[in-house]
Image (cartoon, rainbow, N blue to C red):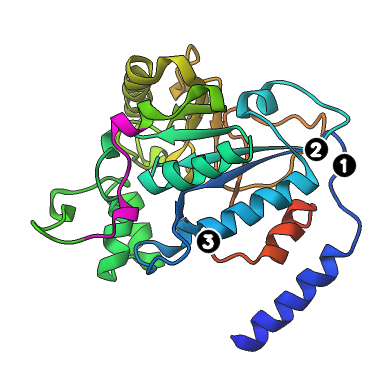
Amino acid sequence: MALRLLVRGAAERVLCALPRRTQPGDRLILAYHNVVPTDWAPCGDRSLHLPVDTFEAQLRVIRNEAEIVPLMELLTTDAPNDRRVAITFDDAYASALALGVGACMAHRAPCTVFVAPGLLGTVPIWDQRANSGTWTAIDREQFLWHQLGRRAASDAPAPRVQVASELLIASADMLRALPRAAGVSFGNHTMTHPNLAALTTDDVRREIDAAWGWLHECLSDAIVPVVAYPYGLAPRDAAGAMPRDHADFGLRVTGNWQRAGAVADPLAFPRWNVPSGISEHGFRVRLRGYLAGR
């Protein structure tokens, strides 16, 4: 393992010295989940929880490689002379609002938070299961397709169980308190965060409609007509399921840079999911266009 990391690190440093593979007009959406204190004791689904010092270093890398723009600007307009990046946060972790959105505000970087109202104030099931040791690849597959990606009654934490506060999803009041003038917007992450690919078309529409109703009531001055699919899994019939009066775009969590002028399915727009364990060189390499599939 140590040798593999050493070789990968050396390769990333070499790639950083090569010319960019991106071109003016290219665009990239970054998907983050949580941002946590630098000195926190790792727990939960560790791939989702990025230390704040790492996140701030990544913001500086982005600034050197591209222009950070609002999500809707990236999705709806062309900029043939610029490389553009949009920053998104899935799930609305309280720590992500305080540290991740806070860092974006300090760097004057607009960002979009995708909210699943049914999760507010809870510890997500994936973090609970990771803490209990039942979140292997097989466990996750069973959860997504047999439990439909939803919490079961047996998944509720026992009374008085202590969990790291950084694993909590924000409250509605925390979301309302974010200053809109700082470039913060909110998007639809469904009502209860199910696996949409395992639901019927009608159930998908109900999930999206219910979340939209909540967003419109509580955060109406800063919402965007975009759905971020839970677990990155799109509905089987996205065109039939997506309410087009308030869901113009659907986002996955797999993908990379999109070429200027490339025709992308607006209901399956790619994002790059940024893992917590990536090195600064590894992040810079990917921002320079050295991503899988390019």
Query: Which residues lie in the magenta part?
Result: 163-174
Can residue 143 be seen by looking at this rendering? no
Element class at badge 2: loop
Earlier along the polypeptide chain: callout 2 or callout 3?
2
Q: Amino acid at mark 2?
A: Arg
Q: Circle 2 sits on which residue?
A: 83
Q: Residue drawn at (39%, 20%), measured in percent from left and top?
A: 219
Residue at the far front: name it: 106
Q: Circle 1 sits on which residue?
A: 23
Residue at the far bottom: name it: 3
Q: Residues within 10 Å of mark 2 (few under 14, many from 20)?
A: many
* Residue 19 within the magenta-colored segment of the rendering: no
Element class at badge 1: loop
Earlier along the polypeptide chain: callout 1 or callout 2?
1
Residue 84: image x %, image y %? 75, 36
Q: Residues within 10 Å of mark 1 (few under 14, many from 20)?
A: some
Residue 191 drawn above or below residue 96:
above
